Amino acid sequence: MCKGPIRCGFIYTCGGTLKGKNGTIESPGYPHGYPNGANCTWVIVAEERNRIHIVFQSFAVEEEYDFLSLYDGHPHPANFRTRLTGFQVPAPVTSTGSVFSLRLTSDFAVSAHGFKIYYEELQSSSCGNPGVPAKGILNGTRFNVGDRIQYRCVPGYTLDGHAQLTCVTSTSNVAAWDFPVPICRAEDTCGGTFRSSSGVISSSDFKNDYKNSGECTWTIVADPGDTISLVFTDFQMDSKFDYLEVEGSEPPSIWLSGTNIPVPIVSNKNWLRLHFVTDNSHRHKGFTAQYQVKRSGDFKSRGVKLLPGKDNTSKFAIMNEGGVKQVSNDCSDPGEPENGRRMGDDFSIGAMVGFTCDGDHVLQGSKSITCQRVAEVLAAWSDHPPVCKVKTCGSNLYGPSGTFTSPNFPIQYESNSQCVWIITASNPNKVIQINFEEFDLELGYDTLTIGDGGEVGDSRTIIQVLTGSFVPDLIVSMTHQMWLHLQSDESVGSIGFKINYKEIDKESCGDPGIPLYGFREGAGFSNGDVLRFECQFGFELIGERTISCQNNNQWSANIPICIFPCLSNFTAASGTVLSPDYPEGYGNNLNCVWLIIAEPGSRIQLAFNDFDLEPPYDFLTVRDGELLGRFTGAEVPSHLTSNSNILQLEFQADHSMSGRGFNISYS
């Protein structure tokens, strides 16, 4: 028989790697309650190019103290998607890739009955069941590309969002619903759907203190391919009890609270959803935000490839009403690009037309497009017609090696840039390898397209399209030439990039390096070679343990990283707690929990050796049942001693900027 809650918790085993077409995940002890001090991680792995769809069949987790964190990939901070707590059954979730992870963490006090989750592997042509909102009704049982489903609400509730969803093929060539699942809002309550190109959203009765015990949800919906920017003009919330969750951006879910005005948010979809929650006792001003829809324009489309020519009425008939008035066997005239020309005048289904640009311009988009049947009755081009952009910067570069940067680096690059670099090896039997020292582009709006050979802009030769700040370790060409095309829009930019290049042997992926705090087995970098990585004792390997050099000269994955675990239990008499990646900077969107557990009757002392967090957005909270301290900024805190034998450290970081982190000794 167990003598205490922590010791009882140790009899459970949980977590693991799951493979197979479908299965069930249950929290340890379900449905009789999970243990205190739990730290369980499940990693679901599907076949390559397939995705993972999870459905919550039951969910009850002690609110605000125990959490289920979801990761779109391996359980690394960069893949963090959202954090779930409380007693409301969450909506279904679909991964963007073939790996999805879940991590349960519980404190040392009360628990709940836990959760039961069903998961299944989705083919690339399936969107999966998107679920039914509370007080909603779903009509439709097929969820493959081309299928449509319809939502409505029970009497007394108003539907916010799109009533009809269509399973379409996204720009990344995977099946996805064209809009988020709508919600059913009680009539005469706050919230709503916004479809205009700009507007203002304010929490309930903003000019006065917002009402207690309320929830509001607003959905902003734009055309497929468009994106939405959200700028806060006022923001005042109780940081302990009230929050605003924003969905539809990168990361997929952003949680905001406190009294500091958040940084602007840009969607990576054609919608944003704001969910405002306030408790039943605290009263603050709330928030006001302005939104602006940014039209897709010149190939900024990140929406669906449903392209019925230039007549927008046809698009609205399909996307909004769910019907088409007549069958079409011809695509609309795609026109000729300015400063370029088109080859081909046949616009019937199956026909292909091509495009070229004048010598001082670069082709942006597909070199050729095909008229094809879409949604059974509509003819549509396989992609947007390209445009020809004048070259504004860039150069021709030659081997064996060198370095180049974006304009003005590390100052912001200019808006409306069209920069082209062509790298040519000194020997035609060599290929080009590039690696990034720095990389930061305006997420979603500015891109660096990398292609093989010297035919700049041809979509058929594209190796990667990069945006934001996450890039591969290495990129290698298939031929002796590589082209890079930087495109920036008319708005604010970022610092840009610094790239090193060198020529290497053909049929090689190049040396990917060795992770910090890790080591590597294997020394070959040619096609077919396999490398294996391990971490030093005490560090957790995040990513692929083995990678292989593929025939396209790209490694099958980035090298893994070795991190100090973000969620751990410490039972040794003394030790050290480090923030992730200390001292290089801990990154964004973190929620780390460490439990230090001593012998009954003992107390625990913390000594802060180094401390640097972004104030006031990132902070470390220390509890032993009662709050002992909440720390932020660069001032090193004083020593701290617990009143019991259990100490919890919880570290939270927001979605932007970071500090050096912290180094804490305990005894």
Image (cartoon, rainbow, N blue to C red):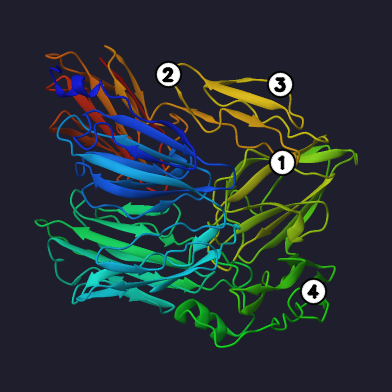
Mark 1 neighbour density, 10 Å: few (under 14) some (14–19) many (20 or more)? many
Is label 4 or label 3 in front? 4
Q: Are marks 2 and 3 in contact (CB under 8 Å)?
A: no
Front position in the image: 278 or 371:
371
Q: What residue is shown with label 3?
A: 523
**Secondary structure under the numbered disc 3 in the rendered image:** loop
Give the residue type at disc 1.
Ile
Q: Disc 2 designates what residue? A: 538
Task: Check the image and report above or below for 40 versus 145.
Answer: above
Question: Which badge, 2 or 3, is on the more N-terminal residue?
Answer: 3
What's the CA distance linking mark 2 and mark 4? 58 Å
Disc 4 element: strand
Question: Which residue corresponds to mark 1?
Answer: 434
Identity of the amino acid at label 4?
A: Val
Tell me the tag on residue 353. 4
Residue that protrudes farthest toward the front in the picture = 141
The answer to which of marks 1 and 3 sits earlier in the sequence is 1
The structure residue drawn at horizontal position 71% and vertical position 41%, both measured from the top left corner, is 434
Residue 547 position within the rendered picture, expressed as x and y whole percent measured from the top left: 63, 31
Distance CA(mark 1)–CA(mark 3): 19 Å
Q: Mark 1 vs mark 4: give the one in front.
A: 4
Q: Residue at x 79, y 76 (%)?
A: 339
Quarter-of-image position of residue 383: bottom right
